[in-house]
C-alpha cells in the first residue's frame, strides 16, 4: 500500500472511532415506507429521536427504535463510565438501502396471475457525539 493511501486510511479509521454504528438487515418493510421514518429522526438528538419513534404510528418505527437503542448500547460499550446526557449523542446519518425482493404470484381473473413484490430493506444508523466533534474541530484549528 502506498504512503498516501495508508495515511488516508489511517485518518479514516481514526475518524470512524468517534462514530457508533448499528445495522438491521432484511427488514421486511418497503424501503420507501422506512425512509419516511428515517427522515423524521435524521440529525436529531437521541432522546428526542426515541420519543419520536415511540409515538409514531408507522410500522417501521418500533424496529427503528430498537435499532437506535442498539446503537446507544454500542456507544456505551466503547465509553464505559461516560454519561449519555453529557455526550450529546445525535443521529449523524441513517441510510435505508433496498434489500432482496421476494416475488409471489397472486391469482387474477381469466386464469392469469399478477406478480406481487414483497420488498425488504437494510438500515444503517450512525450516531455521533457533538462534544467529540467540537473537540476534533478545535484541535485541527490549533495546528
Image (cartoon, rainbow, N blue to C red):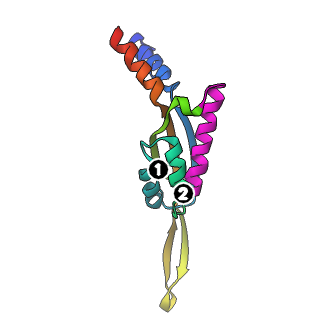
Along the polypeptide, which appears first: circle 1 or circle 2? 2
Q: Main secondary structure of the magenta part?
A: helix
**Which residue in the rendered view is the most extreme toward the top?**
143
**In the drawing, does residue 45 fall left or right of residue 4?**
right
Q: Is residue 103 above or below residue 100?
A: below
In percent of the image, x 47 and y 17: which residue is there? 10
Is residue 57 in the magenta section?
no
* Number of numbered discs overlaid on the protein picture: 2
Classify 10 Å Cα crowding around label 2: few (below 14), some (14-19), many (20 and above): many
Q: Which mark is residue 97?
A: 1
- 25 and 59: which one is in front? 59
In percent of the image, x 37 and y 14: which residue is there? 140
Position of the C terminus by quadrant = top left
Which element type, helix, strand or loop, lies under badge 2?
helix
In percent of the image, x 43 and y 25: which residue is there? 133
Q: CA distance from mark 1 to mark 2?
A: 16 Å
Residue 86 at x, y percent in the picture:
54, 29
* Viewer-side label of 1, 2: 2
In percent of the image, x 59 and y 56: which residue is there? 62
Magenta stretch in the rendered image: 61-83
Classify 10 Å Cα crowding around label 1: few (below 14), some (14-19), many (20 and above): some
Q: Is residue 99 visible?
A: no
**Which residue in the rendered view is the most extreme toward the bottom?**
110
**Which residue in the rendered view is the most extreme toward the front?**
85
Residue 77 at x, y percent in the picture:
66, 30
Residue holding disc 2: 61
Residue 78 at x, y percent in the picture:
62, 26
Amino acid at each position: 500500500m502506498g504512503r498516501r493511501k495508508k495515511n488516508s486510511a489511517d485518518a479514516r479509521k481514526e475518524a470512524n472511532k468517534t462514530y457508533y454504528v448499528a445495522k438491521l438487515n432484511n427488514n421486511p418493510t418497503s424501503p420507501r415506507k422506512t425512509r419516511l421514518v428515517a427522515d423524521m429522526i435524521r440529525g436529531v438528538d437521541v432522546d428526542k429521536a426515541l420519543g419520536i419513534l415511540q409515538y409514531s404510528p408507522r410500522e417501521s418505527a418500533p424496529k427503528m427504535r430498537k435499532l437506535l437503542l442498539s446503537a446507544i448500547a454500542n456507544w456505551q460499550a466503547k465509553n464505559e463510565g461516560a454519561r449519555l446526557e453529557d455526550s450529546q449523542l445525535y443521529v449523524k446519518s441513517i441510510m435505508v438501502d433496498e434489500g432482496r425482493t421476494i416475488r409471489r404470484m397472486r391469482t387474477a381473473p381469466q386464469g392469469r396471475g399478477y406478480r406481487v413484490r414483497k420488498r425488504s430493506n437494510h438500515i444503517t444508523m450512525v450516531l455521533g457525539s457533538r462534544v467529540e466533534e467540537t473537540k476534533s474541530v478545535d484541535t485541527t484549528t490549533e495546528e
